[in-house]
Amino acid sequence: MNRNVVLRVIVLRLIATAMAAAWLSACASTSGTGGAAYLPPPIAEGKGRLSLQAGGINQLNFYVVDDATGDEVYEDMPRISSRSPSGYDSGAEQNRLTVDLPPGTYTVIVNTDIEDDVVIEDVVVQMGQEIYQTVPVGRFQLHMQGAGPIGSQMPFLIWDWNMSGVLGRGMTSSEVRRFIVPAGRYKVRIENSSSNFDMIKPVEVSFGRITQVIMSSPTQEEPETEQSQQN
Amino acid sequence: MSSMSSYCISSNRMSRYRVLFAMLVLGGSADSLWAADIVGIVVDRTGSRHQVRDLEIRGSTTLEYYVSGRRRQMQMARIERLHIGGTPQDQEAPVTVTMRTGLVEKGTMIINAGSSLSDDAGSASHVSDRLTGKTNLGPLFLPLTDVQEVLFQHSKDAPLVPDMVSGSIVDERGRRFVLSDIRYRGDDAFRFKQGRKKKRVALRHVSRLEFGDSPGGELRPVTITYQTGRVVQGQVDASTVRLSGEVDHVYRTRTDSAFTGVRSEGGMFGIGLKRVKLVLVKAPAEETDEATETSEGQTQESQTQQD
């Protein structure tokens, strides 16, 4: 009986050791070189980490200014102009909103697709610590339904709510394209005088959401109807 | 009178020295640096008063309203009092904004834009029109339609930001115009680009803007000299191409009235980016000195007349 008990204990210990070894090797495989793509790298020595939280947005045009010296210590401008015809969003975008900085107090300036910037002041970075800073921006996307004769790429204007002034410009796209603006209310106007297309839509943008704006463009049938009426 | 087109958040208090230094070097506005911990008394339409801290309207410490049809964004740190008139059913209510400098602005403010047609927007995204903050009894959420008055309480250390700057503008023909209340596109800050980077600098921190020539005329180089002596290069969009959807008055304002002001001999002044060559801004100290000299001169004159 004693031998059986001893054998069972030995077997159990062997199994436990094997499981522990397997677990450790699994950990090693994720935290080693192969896992660098999955986990954030450790904070650089003598620095702290600043992560911007933009409600699901992975890339922003922003720069960081050291309040003590006034120097720009970091800059990242990956997004191209909202009015560029070649701009689109990719699902493979990596998060670029994390930056390691020496300890200090900073101001973060986030450029959006309109004139209004988001300025985050008094961001204190401490050595070895990671802080999260929320950026109150949201996104909207413009869908052109039945683009037809006017094409899928059309310039449009972003106005303030009362339409007293133009805040920014954009270009629609057949690709996925989202425009980043500070959370708030705006209006979007698309005008194409050659096709008599003029539409104004209100846009409410809130943090962490993507507002979908649907624009129905004139179909190809309408000009024919007009022609038949003229004839 | 001044407006702010940036949204500011503050997470910690800074020492005054550091704030002033950052203000000067950044070229930003001092008001935004003092945006933390907005405190005030909120009076609702039933007359109840609430002592509120961390006060925000639509989740921001920037107040957006319209004066003479033009959008204005003002940091709450610069406002002394906000009065909302009209009725709770109004979508846009008349407001009276009293600045800490004593300036009073009358305009309108959206207090209930949620009443717009819901099928205009394709998603359920909604901006809540409410005032939020903290009271001793807990968090406060008050619809803007129920707010009648906000009396802001500011620290004595908070600097008083001047409402307007004066100086002179020289056009490409060499003519010089002496102006007060100089503004750039209706704002008290000058916006420019450095590559993809967009920057803005409050005009009161600038001593000189010198515009260069560009062959195409679309983007004009500009040299910005700060009051501190720092010099920065940038570019501005001086295009006169009419954008599709741009109405007449917006187009004319953009092309012919990039810089506006009030002439010393009276009358409004406006000049487009195509024609402007030089903008010289008086330092606030210079203005104070001149005002003192003027008042002293007037006193001496009056004394002479009395004698």
Image (cartoon, rainbow, N blue to C red):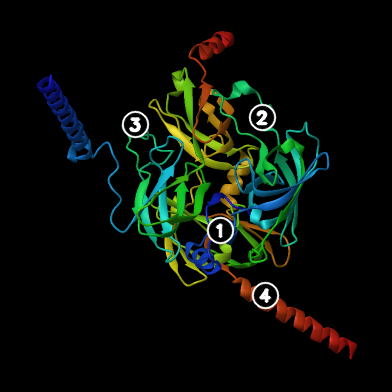
> Closer to us: mark 4 or mark 2?
2
Q: CA distance from mark 1 to mark 4?
A: 24 Å
Q: Position of residue B190 (x, y in %)?
A: 54, 57
- Where is the N terminus of chain B found, in terms of image quarters? bottom right
Marking on residue B33: 1
Q: Earlier in the sequence, mark 4 or mark 2?
A: 2
* Helix, strand or loop under label 1: helix
| Circle 1: residue type | Leu
Marking on residue B288: 4
Determine the residue positioned at 55% across, 38% down: A183
Q: Are marks 4 and 2 on the same chain?
A: yes
- Where is the C terminus of chain B found, in terms of image quarters? bottom right
Q: Residues within 10 Å of mark 1 (few under 14, many from 20)?
A: many
> Closer to us: mark 1 or mark 3?
1
Q: Are marks 1 and 4 in contact (CB under 8 Å)?
A: no
Q: Position of residue A88 (x, y in %)?
A: 37, 32
| Circle 3: residue type | Ser
Q: Residues within 10 Å of mark 2 (few under 14, many from 20)?
A: some
Identify residue for label 3: A90
Instruction: Please report, as a chain letter, where disc 2 is located.
Output: B
* Helix, strand or loop under label 3: loop
- Furthest toward the right, the residue is B306
